[in-house]
Amino acid sequence: MAEPGARQRTGVELGVGIGWRAELDLSIERMPGVDFLEVVAENIRPADLPESLRVLRARGLPVVPHGVSLGVGGAEPPSPARLAHLAACAQALDSPLVSEHLAFVRGGGIEAGHLLPVPRTRESLRVITANVRRAQDALPVPLALENVAAIFGWPDDELTEAQFLAELVERTGVGLLIDVANLYTNQFNLGLSATDALDALPLEHLAYVHVAGGYEHHGIWHDTHTTSAPEPVLDLLTELCARATPPGVLLEWDDEYPSDAALGSELARIRAAMSAAGESG
């Protein structure tokens, strides 16, 4: 049972979507089969939304603001200004939820420049629980947190990532944004079993899922969001869907943008991977 003050999970059906980028605005506007969108919150101004987002919202497509700089994983409380911006984005877009990363991004005024893994200790869990509750109190809609692609592990970790997330969910009721590409990255680079993570995560609190591509270079997997999702990532999506029905699955593509047809093909591959879970069952 969640502790007193725990929030409701998101419970919003989203479908299959794509991350909105200014470079993809016209592609997304003319693309069939897009059910919802996600926009990087730091890239928009709530008082002056891009015309494309206004057009797509007018068509009824939900838009989720996705933060990258809040830093709930730090020792310092989340910035009131950053929280106010996320809240304003949610209100301007009439969003069903807001998402962010469970990550360390700054300390002592110094920016890390990367979404770094948090120390998975009991003390860290206590601090992050307080940070998440502050964020929830400041937002007008539910919050979901994303697992990150770790570039290292802390030597004093007491919990696995899945255990840490499960306890955080139990304490706060926060939703989960599970990035299967990040699970694959951590398996490839750090030897952390992605299926073990899926077995341990409280998927009943799933808000939605990320899918993205990357590439291997000199034995390291780089989660670049610039290529088609590899089959192992889609296999993980199928594994997730065999355990729970995700309210939404979203394709991230951040650079080296492909044709409309290629993006449409990626969405079709995502739907096929989701359907494969039912066929194998």
Image: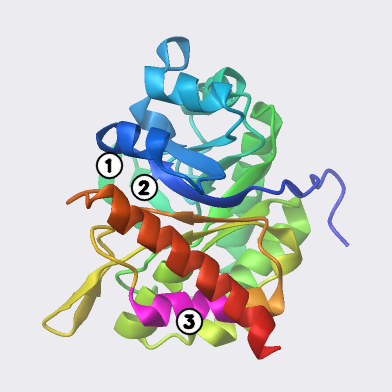
Residue linked to disc 3: 235
Viewer-closest of 142 and 74: 142
Which amino acid does the dot numbered 2 rest on?
Answer: Val
What's the magenta region?
230-239
Residue linked to disc 1: 111
Query: Mark 2, residues whose alpha carbon is within 10 Å: few (<14), some, or many (≥20)?
Result: many
Q: Which quadrant: the C terminus?
A: bottom right
Direction from residue 234 to residue 10 in the image, left or right: right
Which amino acid does the dot numbered 1 rest on?
Answer: Glu
Residue linked to disc 2: 105
Pointers 1 and 2 in contact (CB under 8 A)? yes
Q: Position of residue 182 (x, y in %)?
A: 41, 68
Q: Is residue 68 visible?
A: no
Mark earlier in primary sequence (1, 2)? 2
Image point 38% across, 88% down: which residue? 191
Q: Give the overall secondary structure of the magenta segment.
A: helix
Viewer-closest of 170 and 260: 260
Residue 135 to residue 231: above or below: above
Pointers 3 and 1 in contact (CB under 8 A)? no
Residue at disc 1, secondary structure:
strand
Which amino acid does the dot numbered 3 rest on?
Answer: Asp
Q: Position of residue 72 (x, y in %)?
A: 51, 46
Mark 3 vs mark 2, foreground winner is: 3
